[in-house]
């Protein structure tokens, strides 16, 4: 868990830096994918899934 959390933090910081510098190419896409996979293995995954489901339900009611 500690290793995956530190990996998520490093990949998140790297992704934020790439977004800020607008340098998202193939390397940025790889970092984004790795960040997503690592984030999915942490304890934050259920919370993120619930939030996305709530957002999708809300948008479904509007449209």
Image (cartoon, helix red, strand yellow):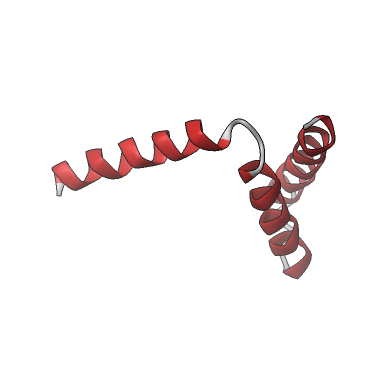
In the image, is residue 41 above or below residue 26? above
Please name whichever residue, 53 or 13, is drawn nearer the observer in this view of the structure.
53
Q: Can residue 47 be seen in this view?
A: yes
Question: Is residue 32 shown left or right of residue 10?
Answer: left
Q: Which residue is drawn at 73% across and 47% down?
A: 15
Question: Is residue 48 shown left or right of residue 2?
Answer: left
**Based on the displayed image, in which of its 4 quarters is residue 24 positioned?**
bottom right
**Residue 57 image offset from top left, x and y in percent:** 24, 41
**Furthest residue toward front:** 1
Image quarter where the N terminus lies is top right
**Based on the displayed image, in which of its 4 quarters is residue 49 positioned?**
top left
Question: Is residue 11 shown left or right of residue 45?
Answer: right
**Furthest residue toward bottom:** 26
Q: Which residue is drawn at 78% across and 45% down?
A: 11
**Residue 39 image offset from top left, x and y in percent:** 65, 42
Please name whichever residue, 6 or 63, is drawn nearer the observer in this view of the structure.
6
In the image, is residue 59 above or below residue 24? above
In the image, is residue 38 above or below residue 45? below
Q: Can residue 24 be seen in this view?
A: no
Total tally of numbered discs in the picture? 0
In the image, is residue 23 above or below residue 59? below
**Residue 26 image offset from top left, x and y in percent:** 74, 70
Q: Residue at x 71, y 42 (%)?
A: 16
**Based on the displayed image, in which of its 4 quarters is residue 52 positioned?**
top left
Question: Is residue 43 shown left or right of residue 48?
Answer: right
**Residue 20 image offset from top left, x and y in percent:** 70, 45
Q: Residue at x 61, y 44 (%)?
A: 40
């Amino acid at each position: 868990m500690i290793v995956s959390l530190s990996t998520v933090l490093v990949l998140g910081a790297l992704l934020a830096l790439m977004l800020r510098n607008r340098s998202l190419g193939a390397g940025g896409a790889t970092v984004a994918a790795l960040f997503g996979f690592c984030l999915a293995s942490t304890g934050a995954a259920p919370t993120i899934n619930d939030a996305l489901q709530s957002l999708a339900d809300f948008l479904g009611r509007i449209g």
